[in-house]
Amino acid sequence: MLVMNDKKNVFIEYLKKLNLYNEDIQASFEAFFEELIDFNQQINLFSRKMDLEDVWILHFLDSISIYEVFSDWQGKKVLDFGTGGGLPGIPIKIVDSDCEMYFLDSVKKKIDTIKKMTTNLNISNVEFLPYRVEDKIMNKYQHYFDIIVCRSVKMNYSIKKALEKLLTKEGKIFLFKAKNLDDVDIFDNKKVHTLDLSIEFERRIVEINYG
């Protein structure tokens, strides 16, 4: 468990640990924090019951924890599936601006909000997909994405099949999971990374390779 009161500082120290820190990145996360807090008053992007300072740990630090597992984002086409409040897609874009990020969520109001936030944050090279991953309109993205990331969606065979259609031959899926991994049993060629983040839940990132 965290013993420091300054959760923002814990996040910054984690950026430094991963060799991801510079002043511009810190400023971008500070701006994102303000955007997320403001827009959360209009549409529920994260639990309104949580301490706002916990956003630095439970959302920002957690999102960039994937860099303990994978860091080759440059030039990649990335799908943030079930993005919700733009997590982990916006944090990844803040750190690796050269990747192409596609935000997918079936709730159009959330996608519209992410579009506003990324515009306000001057984040470019992004696309917005207000669909379900199984929708026919997603057929235009078959074998398109190098990487798919997902923090919040429970997997099933229908979703698995839809995601696999979207990946390139060498593609990867990264699923952010806690202790319960029952829904990832349907995937082959997976590797489970257990991270020690000293947060209030156990974080596991399931890496699924198709290359």
Image: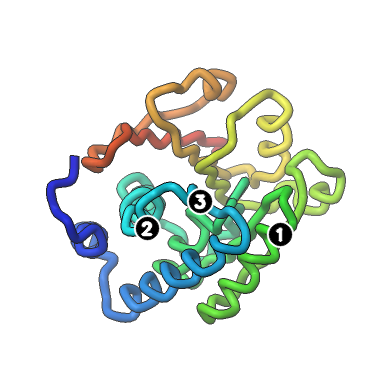
Residue, x 53% and y 46% (percent of image)? 149
* For discs 2 and 1, the disc positioned in front in the rendered view: 2
> Whole-Å distance between the Cαs marked 3 and 1?
14 Å
Instruction: Decide which of 65, 87 is in the foreground and name it.
Output: 87
Q: Is residue 133 above or below residue 191?
A: below
Q: Secondary structure at mark 2?
A: helix
Looking at the picture, which amino acid does disc 3 mark? Phe
> Whole-Å distance between the Cαs marked 3 and 2?
10 Å
Q: Secondary structure at mark 1?
A: helix
Residue 154 at x, y = what percent? 58, 30
Instruction: Decide which of 126, 164 is in the foreground and name it.
Output: 126
Looking at the picture, which amino acid does disc 1 mark? Lys
Residue, x 48% and y 51% (percent of image)? 48
Side (left or right) of 158 relative to 135 = left
Label 3 sits on residue: 46
Image quadrant occupied by the N terminus: top left
Side (left or right) of 8 relative to 167 = left
Q: Is residue 150 above or below residue 155?
A: below
Residue, x 45% and y 38% (percent of image)? 176
Label 1 sits on residue: 109
